[in-house]
Image: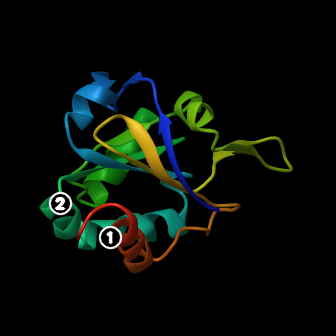
């Protein structure tokens, strides 16, 4: 589901995989941020999407779009995945799914386990959610080129 909006968001803080405080507004500064919610290190579809994002990192950097990945992983798993994929952007653990709950992307599966839906949020420099994509299941990430076209069409020239 794709949604265009301008919803103001409040700042939030969490601990990164090294137990350092991550302050979203401090990280964002005056730039755009694309938040990438994904299920976790175990999800092959999620890893593939993050690799495609990383392959296109220059297109995001050229336009001052910072990237931020968030999963339900533990601190260790988040750190391992960041290193394994050579991600040059933060990969935050959200083991208790508090950030996922804040964005409404937490889901419960049949066996009672809770996961994060694959979702994307484009946050503008005024700290507003300008565009969002929420998937319905683990494989619902858009193609990166489609994502870049959506950003280009609606917000920034890439």
Q: Which residue is mark 1?
A: 152
Please tell me which residue is depicted at 79% across the width and 49% down the height of the picture.
Answer: 109
Q: CA distance from mark 1 to mark 2?
A: 10 Å
In the figure, 87 relative to 128: above or below? below
Find disc 2 in the rendering and name its residue.
Answer: 63
Q: Residue at x 25, y 36 (%)?
A: 28
Name the quadrant containing residue 158.
Answer: bottom left
Give coordinates of residue 157: x percent, y percent.
23, 69
Residue at the (34%, 32%) spot, across then down: 17
Callout 1 environment at 10 Å: few (<14), some (14 to 19), or many (20+)?
few
Q: Position of residue 53 (x, y in %)?
A: 33, 67
Crowding around mark 2 (Cα neighbors within 10 Å: few <14, some 14 to 19, many 20+) is few
Is residue 120 in view? no
Front-most of residues 48 and 135: 135
Q: Quadrant of the N terminus?
A: bottom right
Residue 13 sits above or below residue 55 on the image: above
N-terminal-most mark, 1 or 2:
2
Element at label 1: helix
- For the residue pair 56 and 114, the one nearer the viewer reads as 56
């Amino acid at each position: 589901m794709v949604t265009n909006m301008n919803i103001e968001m409040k700042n939030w803080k969490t601990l990164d995989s090294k137990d350092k405080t991550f302050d979203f507004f401090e990280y964002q500064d005056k730039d755009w941020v694309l938040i990438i919610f994904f299920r976790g290190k175990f999800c092959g579809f999620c890893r593939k999407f993050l690799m495609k994002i990383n392959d296109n990192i220059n297109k995001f950097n050229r336009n001052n779009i910072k990237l931020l990945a968030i999963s339900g992983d533990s601190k260790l798993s988040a750190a391992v995945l960041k290193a394994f994929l050579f991600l040059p952007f933060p990969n935050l653990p959200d083991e208790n799914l508090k950030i996922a709950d804040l964005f409404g992307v937490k889901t419960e599966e049949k066996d009672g386990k809770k996961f994060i839906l694959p979702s994307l949020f484009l946050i503008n420099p005024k700290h507003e959610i300008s565009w969002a994509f929420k998937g319905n299941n683990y494989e619902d990430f858009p193609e990166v080129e489609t994502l870049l076209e959506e950003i280009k069409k609606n917000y920034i020239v890439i």
